[in-house]
Image: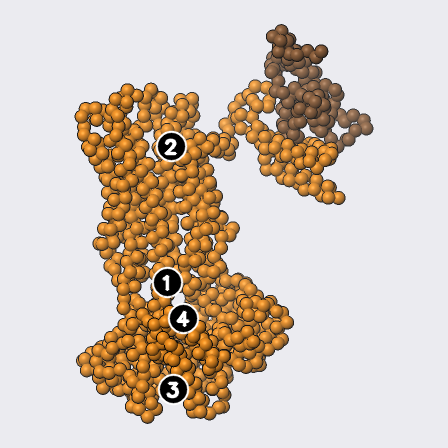
Chain colours: A brown, B orange
C-alpha cells in the first residue's frame, strides 16, 4: 500500500525527525518532547511550543504518531503522544538515509571520528 | 509572588497572540496543549534571563506558526507529506503574501519608496492637521449632557432683515427682562431655559487690578446646561446676595486653585462678593467668554421693556422641533409687545451655540480644508506617477509572473496592496507631519476663531489619518495597477523590449497635477492680492504715530447708588482731565484725545437719529454710529474737514451750542440734495447743528462695509468718553507703555491699562483672518506646485531614457542638439499648457467659494490667473530643462551600440 510506504515521507523535516526520535523513548506530552529534543541535540535545538505542535499535528495527520493513554502516575490532564508502527518505520528509514549520508561523508573524510 | 503574577501576564499575552495568529484548525486541535507546554517551559526556566529568552522564543514561534500554518506554502514547509490538493488560497492569505512581497519591493527600490512616503506624509499630514482644526472648532459638541438639545434663543423682528445696521440684531436679537420673564413662564418647548448677559468688572486684590468678563445668568441657565460645580454650589433661584461663581480658569490663574476660597469674599468693582463655587474645567459655552458668573434675578415690573440685553439658552424637550419652539416664542412675544405701535413681526431664531459661535469661521475653514484635500490629491497623483515609473522597471518581473500563470486580477491586487502599504507608511509619517502642522496652524490661526486653543491630535485624528492612508493608497495605486496588469507578457519578454507607450497616461496625471496646483495657486493669489489691497487702504486718519490704550476706570468710585449725579459727573470730569494731562505731559507725547469708541476694537455703538427733512422708508430704523469725542480728537487723528469746520474744545463746554460733525456717507445718505452744513439732527432729545463734514473713515474694518454713517459729538459728559485714549506720539511702544502706566497709576492704582498698542498694530490685527487664510492657501499651493514639478521632472527624465535610441539616431543623422532640446522641452510645454489651462478653467468655477473672502480684486482677476498660469508654465519648463539637456548630450554611438 503506497500510503504506508515509509520512503514516501523522506527526507523528513528536521523537527519531525526529532519528534519521532523523542517519542522513540516512549509516550510523552509536548513539554517532555521538547526536553528530550534538547537532550538529544545537546541543547542545540529548542523548538517553541507552536512549532512543535504544528509539526506534531501534521505527523498525527500522516499517521506517524498517535494519541496515547496517559501512563499511570503521570499528569492526567495532558495529552500524550506515541509512535505508531508506521512512525517507527519512517524513523528507521530516515535514520538509515542519514546513516548512508554519514557513511559517504566518512568516506570523503568529512567526518572526524572521535579518537 | 511577583514571579507568579508575571507568569500569568505572560500567559495571557501568549493566549491572546495564539488566538490572534494561529489559524483556527490548529488552535482547535493543539491550542490548549501549546498553552500548557508554554507554561511548563516558563516554569522550568531557572533564571529570569532564561525565562526572557524562552518567552521570546515562544512568541517568535507563534509568529512562525502563523505564517507556516496557512497559505499554499505551509504544507511543504512542515508537513511530512507532499502538498495536498491545492485549495484556492483565501483572500486574506493572498494579501498577507502580497504584503510581504510589497515590503521586499519597497526595500529594493528605496529611493522611490522614500519619495513616495514623504509625498504622502506631507499630503496626509496636512489634511489630518486641518481635520483636527475642523474637529475642535466646528464639530466637537459642547461639554454638557446631551449637547445637541441645547440651543441659544434669540427673539428677532422680521422687519430688521433688510436694514444693514440691524442685520446683526435680526439674527441675534436680545430679550428685554419682561420679555424673557413672559417667555420663561409660558414656553412649553424647553424642559429648562434661562437667560444671561455679560459685562466686565474690575477684580482687585493685593495682586493688583484686572478686568474680567462677568456673566450674569438666571437659575434656568444652569438647569438648562445641567452644570454641577466642581466646588461649592450654584446660586439659589432667587439669590440676591452678592455672590459669584468662578470659572476653573480664573480660579487657578488668579487664585492658584485655592479651595479655601469658596465661602470667602473677593473684591469685584470695589465691593465684597462671596465666592460660592467653582465651575468645572470643562465648562465652556462656545462664544461666551466669562471668567466668573453672578446670579441674575429678573425684575418683576415692566420698566425695562425696551432694554434688550439678554440671550436665552434652553434645553429642548425630547422630540420638539426647532421650528415649533421658534413659533411658540414668536407667539408669546407678539402678545407681550401687543401695545407696540409699529406692529412688528416677531420671530424666534434658534441655533446651536457651536453653530452660532462658528458661523463666521465655518466657510473659511471649510475652504482651507478643501484646499488641503486638493493638496492630498496632488500628492496621490505624484505617488501614482512614481509607481508607474517604478512599474516600468518591473514590467519584466510582472510579465514573468504572468507567463507563469498569474492572473491579471491577481497582479493588479498585488500592485494595489503595494500602494496601500505605501499609503499606510505615508500615514504613519503623516501623523508626525500632522503633529508639527497642528502646532503651526494653532500659531497661525488667530485666537478669534473659537476653541482654536483646544485643537489637538487625538484618536479621531489618527482614525482620519488611517482612512486617508487607505484612500490615498487606492487612489494612487489603482491607475498603475490597472495599467501595469495589462502588460502583454509575450511582448515585454522579447529581448530589448522597452516599456510600452504608457507615456500618455503619465502625461495625463502630470496635467491633472498641474491643474490642481493652478487652482490652489489662483486661490492663493486672490487672497494675497486681497491682503495687499486691504493693507493699501487708508483708514481716513493717520494711524502712524498714533498710540492707543483702553483704560478700565473705577466707575463705582464716582457713581454710587443714590449718590448725587451732578457731583459725580464733576468729580469724574476732573479725574479724567488729570488723567489725560498726566499722559499728555509724558516727554515725547504731543497730544491725547478721548473717544467713546476705540477704532478697530470691535466697539460699535449705533443710536437712533432724526436728520432734518429725512423721510424714512416704512419700517426703516434711522440710526447711525455715534462717537463722543474730546475737542482735539480730529487734530490727534489728523482728520481734515471736507466742508465746514471740526469740533473744538469750546464746543464741549456745557453752555455751548450743540454741534456735530458727520461723515460724507452720513450727509449723502440723509441729505441727497447736497446742502449739508447747518442742517439739524435730533439725537438723545437734543438738536444738533452740523458744522462740518469729513471724508468717510474706516474704524471697524478696512473693508469698510460697516459703520459708514457716523457722526461725532463733543463729550459733554466726561463719562461718555473717558476710557479710550488716542495718543499722538513719536515714542515706540516699549518707551511709551511703562511711562503710560506710571502716569495713570500715579493718579489711581486701581485703573487697569489694557490693550496698549500702536494703532497700525491694531489695524493689522483686524487683518489677522485675511492673513492666516492667505498664508495657509499659499503654503498649500506651493506644496502642490512642488509636487507637480517633481512629477514633470520624473516623467520627462523617464521619457528621455525611453527615447534614448531614437534621440541618438536623430543626433547621428545630423539633428542639431538645439532641436533635441526643443523636442523634449516642447513635450513638457504641451503637457504643462494642457494642465495649466485645465486648472484655469477649474479655478474659474472653484474660486466661487472664495467670493466672500476676496476683496478689492475681481474674483476673475485676469492678472492673478495669468500670473499663476505663467508661473507654473515657467516652472514646468525649468523642471524639464535638466532631462532635456541630458537628452541633447546623448552620445549617438554609445546608444546605438547598446
Between disc 3 and disc 2, whose residue precedes?
2
Q: Earlier in the sequence, mark 1 or mark 2?
A: 2
Give the CA distance from mark 1 to mark 4: 25 Å
Element carrying mark 1:
helix
The chain letter under disc 1 is B
- Spatial separation of the CA atoms under disc 3 and disc 2: 80 Å
Which numbered disc, 1 or 4, marks the residue that appears first in the sequence? 4
Cα–Cα span, label 3 and label 1: 35 Å
In three-dimensional space, the C-alpha distance between marks 4 and 3, rounded to whole angstroms, equals: 32 Å
- Camera-near label (3 vs 2) is 3
Secondary element type, mark 2:
helix
Q: Residue at x 67, y 42 (%)?
A: B9
Q: Do the CB atoms of the residues marked 1 and 2 lie less than 8 Å apart?
A: no
Disc 3 marks which residue? B717
Q: Are marks 4 and 3 on the same chain?
A: yes
Mark with earlier residue (3, 1) = 3
Which residue appears at 61% of the width and 15% of the height? A10
Left or right position of A70 against B315: right
Q: Name the element at disc 3.
A: loop
Compared to residue B668, the image places residue B816 above or below, namely: above
Left or right placement of residue B261 versus residue B672 in this view: right
Instruction: Find residue B283 and report its horizontal and vertical position in percent.
Output: 53, 65
Indicate the secondary structure of the residue bearing disc 4: helix
Amino acid at each position: 500500500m503506497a500510503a504506508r510506504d515509509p520512503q514516501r515521507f523522506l527526507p523528513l523535516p528536521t523537527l519531525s525527525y526529532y519528534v519521532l526520535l523523542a517519542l522513540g523513548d516512549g509516550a510523552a506530552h509536548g513539554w517532555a518532547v521538547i526536553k528530550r529534543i534538547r537532550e538529544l541535540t545537546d541543547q542545540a535545538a529548542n523548538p517553541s511550543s507552536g512549532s512543535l505542535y504544528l509539526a506534531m499535528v501534521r505527523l498525527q495527520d500522516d499517521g506517524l504518531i498517535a494519541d496515547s493513554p496517559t501512563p499511570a502516575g503521570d499528569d492526567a490532564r495532558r495529552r500524550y503522544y506515541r509512535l505508531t508502527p508506521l512512525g517507527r518505520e519512517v524513523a528507521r528509514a530516515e535514520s538509515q538515509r542519514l546513516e548512508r549520508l554519514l557513511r559517504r561523508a566518512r568516506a570523503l573524510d568529512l567526518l572526524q571520528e572521535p579518537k | 509572588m511577583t514571579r507568579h503574577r508575571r507568569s500569568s501576564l505572560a500567559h495571557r499575552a501568549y493566549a491572546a497572540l495564539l488566538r490572534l495568529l494561529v489559524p483556527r484548525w490548529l488552535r482547535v486541535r493543539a491550542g490548549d496543549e501549546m498553552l500548557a507546554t508554554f507554561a511548563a517551559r516558563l516554569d522550568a526556566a531557572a533564571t529570569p534571563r532564561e525565562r526572557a529568552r524562552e518567552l521570546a522564543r515562544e512568541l517568535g514561534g507563534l509568529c512562525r506558526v502563523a505564517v507556516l500554518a496557512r497559505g499554499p506554502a505551509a504544507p511543504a514547509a512542515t508537513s511530512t507529506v507532499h502538498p495536498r490538493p491545492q485549495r484556492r488560497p483565501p483572500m486574506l492569505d493572498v494579501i498577507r503574501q502580497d504584503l510581504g512581497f510589497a515590503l521586499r519591493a519597497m526595500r529594493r527600490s528605496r529611493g522611490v519608496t522614500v519619495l513616495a512616503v514623504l509625498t504622502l506624509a506631507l499630503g496626509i499630514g496636512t489634511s489630518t492637521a486641518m481635520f483636527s482644526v475642523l474637529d475642535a472648532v466646528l464639530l466637537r459638541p459642547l461639554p454638557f449632557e446631551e449637547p445637541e438639545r441645547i440651543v441659544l434663543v434669540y427673539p428677532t423682528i422680521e422687519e430688521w432683515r433688510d436694514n444693514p445696521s440691524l442685520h446683526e440684531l435680526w439674527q441675534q436679537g436680545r430679550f428685554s427682562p419682561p420679555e424673557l420673564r413672559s417667555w420663561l413662564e409660558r414656553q412649553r418647548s424647553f424642559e429648562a431655559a434661562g437667560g444671561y448677559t455679560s459685562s466686565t468688572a474690575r477684580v482687585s486684590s493685593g495682586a493688583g487690578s484686572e478686568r474680567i468678563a462677568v456673566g450674569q445668568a438666571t437659575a434656568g441657565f444652569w438647569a438648562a446646561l445641567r452644570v454641577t460645580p466642581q466646588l461649592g454650589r450654584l446660586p439659589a433661584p432667587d439669590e440676591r446676595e452678592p455672590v459669584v461663581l468662578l470659572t476653573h480658569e480664573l480660579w487657578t490663574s488668579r487664585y492658584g486653585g485655592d479651595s479655601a476660597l469658596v465661602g470667602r469674599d473677593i473684591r469685584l468693582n470695589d465691593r465684597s462678593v462671596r465666592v460660592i463655587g467653582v465651575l468645572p474645567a470643562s465648562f465652556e459655552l462656545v462664544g461666551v467668554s466669562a471668567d466668573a458668573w453672578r446670579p441674575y434675578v429678573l425684575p418683576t415690573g415692566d420698566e425695562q421693556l425696551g432694554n434688550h440685553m439678554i440671550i436665552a439658552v434652553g434645553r429642548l424637550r425630547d422630540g420638539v422641533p426647532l421650528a415649533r419652539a421658534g413659533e411658540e416664542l414668536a407667539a408669546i412675544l407678539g402678545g407681550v409687545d401687543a401695545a407696540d405701535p409699529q406692529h412688528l413681526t416677531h420671530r424666534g431664531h434658534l441655533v446651536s451655540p457651536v453653530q452660532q459661535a462658528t458661523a463666521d469661521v465655518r466657510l473659511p475653514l471649510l475652504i482651507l480644508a478643501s484646499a488641503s484635500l486638493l493638496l492630498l490629491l496632488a500628492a496621490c497623483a505624484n505617488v501614482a506617477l512614481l509607481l508607474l515609473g517604478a512599474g516600468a522597471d518591473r514590467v519584466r518581473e510582472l510579465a514573468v509572473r504572468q507567463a507563469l500563470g498569474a492572473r491579471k486580477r491577481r497582479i493588479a491586487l498585488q500592485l494595489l496592496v503595494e500602494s496601500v502599504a505605501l499609503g499606510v507608511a505615508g500615514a504613519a509619517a503623516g501623523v508626525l507631519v500632522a503633529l508639527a502642522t497642528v502646532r503651526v496652524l494653532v500659531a497661525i490661526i488667530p485666537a478669534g476663531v473659537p476653541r482654536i486653543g483646544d485643537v489637538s491630535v487625538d484618536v479621531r485624528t489618527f482614525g482620519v489619518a488611517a482612512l486617508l492612508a487607505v484612500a490615498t493608497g487606492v487612489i494612487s495605486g489603482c491607475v498603475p495597477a490597472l495599467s501595469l496588469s495589462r502588460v502583454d507578457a509575450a511582448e515585454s519578454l522579447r529581448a530589448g523590449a522597452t516599456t510600452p507607450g504608457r507615456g500618455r497616461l503619465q502625461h495625463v496625471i502630470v496635467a491633472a497635477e498641474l491643474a490642481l496646483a493652478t487652482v490652489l495657486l489662483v486661490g492663493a493669489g486672490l487672497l494675497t492680492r486681497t491682503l495687499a489691497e486691504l493693507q493699501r487702504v487708508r483708514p481716513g486718519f493717520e494711524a502712524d504715530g498714533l498710540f492707543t490704550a483702553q483704560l478700565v476706570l473705577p466707575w463705582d468710585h464716582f457713581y454710587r447708588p443714590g449718590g448725587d449725579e451732578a457731583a459725580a459727573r464733576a468729580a469724574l470730569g476732573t479725574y479724567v482731565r488729570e488723567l489725560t494731562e498726566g499722559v499728555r505731559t509724558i516727554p515725547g507725547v504731543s497730544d491725547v484725545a478721548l473717544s467713546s469708541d476705540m477704532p478697530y476694537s470691535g466697539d460699535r455703538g449705533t443710536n437712533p437719529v432724526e436728520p432734518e427733512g429725512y423721510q424714512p422708508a416704512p419700517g426703516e430704523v434711522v440710526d447711525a454710529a455715534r462717537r463722543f469725542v474730546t475737542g482735539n480728537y480730529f487734530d490727534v487723528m489728523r482728520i481734515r474737514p471736507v466742508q465746514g469746520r471740526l469740533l473744538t474744545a469750546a464746543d464741549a463746554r456745557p453752555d455751548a451750542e450743540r454741534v456735530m460733525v458727520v461723515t460724507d456717507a452720513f450727509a449723502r445718505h440723509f441729505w441727497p440734495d447736497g446742502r449739508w452744513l447747518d442742517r439739524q439732527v435730533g439725537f438723545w432729545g437734543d438738536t444738533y447743528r452740523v458744522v462740518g463734514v469729513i471724508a468717510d473713515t474706516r474704524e471697524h474694518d478696512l473693508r469698510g462695509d460697516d459703520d459708514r454713517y457716523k457722526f461725532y459729538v463733543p463729550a459733554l459728559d466726561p463719562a461718555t468718553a473717558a476710557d479710550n485714549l488716542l495718543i499722538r506720539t513719536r515714542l515706540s511702544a516699549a518707551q511709551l507703555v511703562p511711562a503710560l502706566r506710571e502716569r495713570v497709576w500715579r493718579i489711581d492704582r486701581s485703573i487697569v491699562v489694557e490693550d496698549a498698542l500702536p494703532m497700525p498694530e491694531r489695524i493689522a490685527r483686524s487683518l489677522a483672518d485675511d492673513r492666516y487664510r492667505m498664508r495657509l492657501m499659499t503654503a498649500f499651493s506651493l506644496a502642490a506646485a512642488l509636487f507637480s514639478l517633481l512629477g514633470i521632472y520624473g516623467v520627462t527624465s523617464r521619457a528621455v531614457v525611453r527615447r534614448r535610441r531614437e534621440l541618438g539616431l536623430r543626433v547621428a543623422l545630423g539633428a542639431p542638439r538645439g532641436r533635441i532640446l526643443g523636442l523634449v522641452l516642447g513635450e513638457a510645454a504641451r503637457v504643462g499648457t494642457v494642465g495649466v489651462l485645465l486648472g484655469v478653467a477649474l479655478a474659474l468655477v472653484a474660486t466661487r467659494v472664495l467670493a466672500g473672502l476676496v476683496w478689492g480684486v475681481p474674483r476673475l482677476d485676469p492678472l492673478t490667473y495669468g500670473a499663476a498660469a505663467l508661473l507654473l508654465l515657467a516652472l514646468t519648463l525649468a523642471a524639464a530643462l535638466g532631462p532635456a539637456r541630458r537628452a541633447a548630450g546623448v552620445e549617438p554611438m554609445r546608444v546605438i551600440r547598446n
